[in-house]
Amino acid sequence: MKTESATDYTVDTIIALATPSGTGAIGVIRLSGPDALKLVNEVFRGKDLEKQASHTIHFGTIRDGEAILDEVLVSLFVAPHSYTKENVVEISTHGSAYIIESIIKLLVRKGARPANPGEFTLRAFLNGQMDLSQAEAVADLIASDSKASHQMAMQQMRGGFSNELQHLRDQLIHFASMIELELDFGEEDVEFANRDDLKGLIYQINRIIQKLISSFEQGNVLKNGVPVVIAGKPNVGKSTLLNALLNEERAIVSEIAGTTRDTIEDEMNIRGINFRFIDTAGIRDTLDIIEAKGVERTHEKIKLAKLIIYLVDPEQEIEDIYQQIAYLNDLQTPYLALVNKMDLLNPDQQSSLSDLDLVYISARNKEGIEELKDQILQKVNLLQINSDDVLISNIRHLEALEKTQESLNRVLENIGSPVTSDFLAMDIKQALYYLGEITGQVTTDDLLETIFSKFCIGK
């Protein structure tokens, strides 16, 4: 159920730059609304745009009076065959900021209105081109910077998540209607909704919802990058390893212990998956207040990590290395234990460590780095994702699914108790409400403003 005021968005014609700001080879100016064709036609010299077919491109000039602003290509998308289901015109100009600004100002004078952030996609949603979860996936697609995040956004934008939810919703609606029918015949004590069937359906729906809820952690990691903490005692080569992984001098490297006193973060892509590597202060007891604060932050980052890369080196006592591995096992976070400076390792030391699962590298010489990347991918286990898997990465969706599950659990609790049908109907309706919030079957103006304000202008 969309709010009445939401329809106010579609009564005028909007305009915005659809390509990034700044000087480039071309710029694309987009208009959408009932007067998009007419407004552009008034300033375009070439064919009569209002007589041309949809999905055609036309060469001509944009003129302010007799002054030529630019030679352009105009692409037409006639309603309802467009992104917004309205008349849409895209003007491809040369990428001069002056030309783009002049054309936009000209069309605003003619009657167009500057678009709000995300307003083109908002109109696509309001006009039934996509549901709300698909609209949110558009923003995720634009922001995707890895193969995995792109794949997840495409899957959601093409309706994978929506189809899953709609199937659940349809089944619940059927039972809700049967229970409503029982209320109409309340005095006759009839039962149209079989309680055992209803219970079985809710168990089935809850399993699917739980699977979606459980996918959030993985989906969120794919969307925002896998946080990987590089930890260890001072001077074991943590900063050198970060530089070797990134293939640039990102962190200061020094022989002086305690050089890194705060966390240093940077991202890299390994086979389509983004990782956020976090170099941390060396773990040790220290009287230096600033270094102690850095060590405290190291422990905080370790708690939030999806993977810990823990470094030791041959200069440490064997017993000390065993104690550090025991510390890692107690954390219950996936980890890779690395022996750095492998070129300094003697056969006796290697033999003493043979019963530990260790990876041997030389960060300074960049030996074992490619093999380490393979181990990182295997450890986080993200290579097994199927392109058809439905993953959620949006906190709004997660919260709505959790509330849906709570409502359905109340239905299960009440089926076996002497609760009247109207209470069962109320809880089922509540579950339907929360599912509808995800796809936009239930919306408010505040919700729409919150979602679409995060979009870029022009999308």
Image (tube, grey):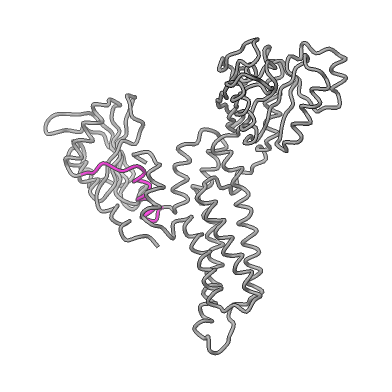
Tell me the quarter of the image containing the N terminus. bottom left
Q: Position of residue 243 (x, y in %)?
A: 60, 17
- Residue 48 in the figure: left or right of residue 398: left
* Numbered circles on residues, count: 0
Specify whether residue 158 is painted magenta: no
Establish if 135 lies above or below 198: above
Looking at the picture, tell me which residue is in the foreground, 142 or 451: 451
Residue at the spot 78% in from the left edge and 25% down from the top edge: 358
- Residue 204 in the figure: left or right of residue 169: right
Q: Position of residue 274 (x, y in %)?
A: 57, 32
Q: Residue furthest bottom?
A: 188
Looking at the picture, tell me which residue is in the foreground, 117 or 425: 425
Specify whether residue 115 is painted magenta: yes
Establish if 29 lies above or below 287: below
Residue at the spot 70% in from the left edge and 21% down from the top edge: 233
Q: Residue furthest left?
A: 66
Residue at the spot 29% in from the left edge and 52% down from the top edge: 9
Establish if 128 lies above or below 337: below
Establish if 401 lies above or below 282: below
Tell me the quarter of the image containing the C terminus. top left
Residue 369 image-quadrant placement: top right
Q: Position of residue 79 (x, y in %)?
A: 31, 51
Residue 73 image-quadrant placement: top left
Residue at the spot 61% in from the left edge and 13% down from the top edge: 253
Looking at the picture, tell me which residue is in the foreground, 405 or 8: 405
Which residues are the magenta region? 112-129
Q: Position of residue 48 (x, y in %)?
A: 20, 42
Q: Residue furthest front?
A: 287
